[in-house]
Amino acid sequence: MRLNFDSETCGLVGPPVLFQYSIDDGPIVLYEIWNEPVHKTLNLIEIFCTTEICGFNVAFDWFHIVQLYNTFREVSEFSKKPNIDEVAYIFTRQPRNYCLKPKNVLDLMLHLKKTNWQTLMDRDDICIKRIPLHLAQPLATTLEQKLVLPNIYFHKRSEGYKWIVEPCEDDFQFSNVKLKWGASYGLKPLCAEIFKVNTLEFPIPRDLWPNEANYNPYGIDWSHTIYKHIAYWQHNKTARSYAEQDIILLKRLYHHFGEPEFGDVDSLLTIAVANARWIGFNLDFNAIKDRYDQQTELVSECPINFNSHHDVKRYLNEKATDIERTLIPNTTKKTLDALATLTTEVGHRARLVRQARKADKEIDILTKLITTRRFCPDLKVIGTRSGRMAGGSDEGSVEGSLNPQGIQRSVEFRKLFLLADKDEILSGGDFDSFEVVIADAVYNDEKLREDLRSGKKFHGLFGQILYDEDYNDVVKDKAKYSAAKTGAFGLLYGAQEHKLAEATNISVEHARQVLEDFFDKYKKVGAARKLVAQAFCSMTQPNGVGTEVIWKEPADYIESLLGYRRYFTLENNIVKCLYDLAVNPPDVFNVAGECVRTTRKQTLKGAVQSALFSCAFQLQAANMRAAANHVIQSTGAEETKRVQEKIWRKQPVGIHKCVVRLLNVHDEIMCVHHLDLTREIRWVVEDEVERFKSVVPLVKMDWQCNLQSWGEK
């Protein structure tokens, strides 16, 4: 039985007000939760857990199912309609007695993220820099005419699809032409684009929005506005039609995608994520309050507004010598780190600013933990185009989520996160040198594998060539090894000589020679890198810089070792449009005049062409890096999720006490579980890692049991 399901909620973390659902392709039911007796709602949710759930952004809806069931089980009268004040009071007690797991699940939002619709996921703006002032608007208009993009990519922007002209801050003779994205992968915008139909856009009126914090699922600000939501969804005919259309479109989308199979790893993990978010993880609350006081004191030691670029620069320059002032181009972390090494007053002030900024970020996290009294991570099961999990809700946020991916790895800070409650066990592990061993499987270079199996580290092998020194000397030198590690990761993720030079603070010529020497030693590494580069290199200049640029069609996607695709359809179309405009600029750019755009004098039309080529080549380089990155990162992301899903199977289907809770941060998995599952979970992890060795021969995972806190991992 397929249950097509959606819900309407009071804000992002407030309880649901309406369930809309249908069985298979049957009639649509609008179930008014607060106008029905509590026992009927509980019975309905129990039925939901016996079905196969088909939804769109299931993690969001199922979180509210878990939330509602746990709170409604605590009310005093099951035979009556729920009382708002009583339910709000129950929220503050944080009831978390039950874990809810349906028979099976399919999340169509995650399914579309595995197709070329993944182009709707967040991406950087595009900026064509330094266009002669009076040609900037004609270029923007031309781009809108030549580069046709669906409106769904700009659904969240009031002006829609529009190239924006912005002045260059350093030279008002030029402007930048920028494209700012605002894509939506919501159900209705997506279906409007796919099926070319009108969908109901009926947002909740502003006065109905609760004042909520997305990181705190136990907040009760919703209690002041939910009565309006109840009336809204009960009496407003357009709102009810909007809710019905969710199910109509959901069913249509299910058939459009060819009725995908239920039970894929990503869909199953939405249920694990939803339960973990409501049930949460334990904290060392007293230690958190002490840490908060310590960080507040560190912030107070900085006498200025340390988040103001202007104030910090003035503060540093007050005591700087003429030579030191040349080292203060900005107040970025990189600049402060460099200044902090000085023994002068400027160095002391840089350390104060750096210390205050770090403490301020930590205070933000600690404040959220103190408010919530639990760690309730909000995770996207597919948060990047490589398929990795990421922090933050797919529904957006009010005051932001508490992103576990952004929590620092310091042992002392992570000791605050006990994770396991009383009578529970904390286990966990992370893959050993995950990116490196996956790269080894991708490159399949016998010489590299021999060196890695001998116990040598990839970063040290790269540093050996970077510094032309003995391997052991590089590994012993912390500064050199750190720089080599940065460069080695750049190499793994497709960095070319310019990026590598920037990462390791060497010249471009030196970086080019390092790559040549490394690829000469490990020939299959170089060959694999070359294949990826060739596949996504659409523009070349065979005769050197300044000569004709030749176009060839690039690849549309690349696959990880486990078959997960990263599509470049949109990026390739944009690069092709920029190339075409640069090669054959329209007559509107044939105007008299010259300018110096970079270092040489050009005609105005030539300056526009140079800017278009420059932007196109930058986008192409980004595509090449992303493609090289994908093969490694996506493989790791998929395997990490496979391990989690295998562990999650230990949680029984239906409504039971929670016996397994999972937390994922990159290649690290933390698991809270019952004592009697310790051996079984270890066996599950070891069995899956052993199976994965057929794909990645050198893979290892260090799994530990009976940990006292996250910090011990």
Image (spheres, grey):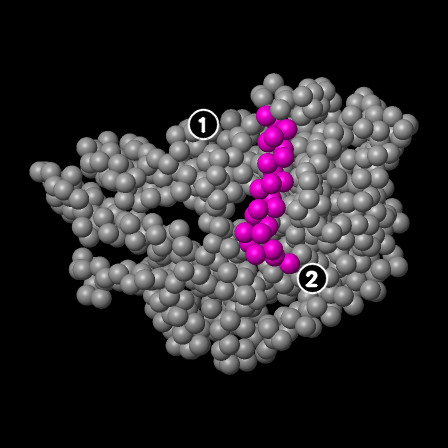
Per the image, label 2 sits on a secondary structure element best described as helix
Say which quarter of the image contains residue 625.
bottom left
First to last magenta residue range: 238-261
- Left or right, 432 with respect to 505, comes to right
Whether 191 is drawn above or below 466: the answer is: above
**Residue 233: x %, y % from top left:** 67, 25
Magenta segment main secondary structure: helix
Q: Which of disc 2 and disc 1 is earlier in sequence?
A: 1
**Residue in the foreground of this view, choosing between 712 and 397:** 397
Q: Quick one: label 2, few (<14), some, or many (20+) residues within 10 Å?
A: some
Say whether marks 1 and 2 touch (CB < 8 Å): no
Tell me what residue is drawn at x 54 percent, y 68 percent: 561
Tell me what residue is drawn at x 51 percent, y 81 percent: 446
Can I make out residue 78 in this image? yes
User: Which residue is outermost to the front?
Assistant: 26
**Residue 643 image label:** 2
**Residue 497: x %, y % from top left:** 35, 61
Q: Which residue is mark 1?
A: 311
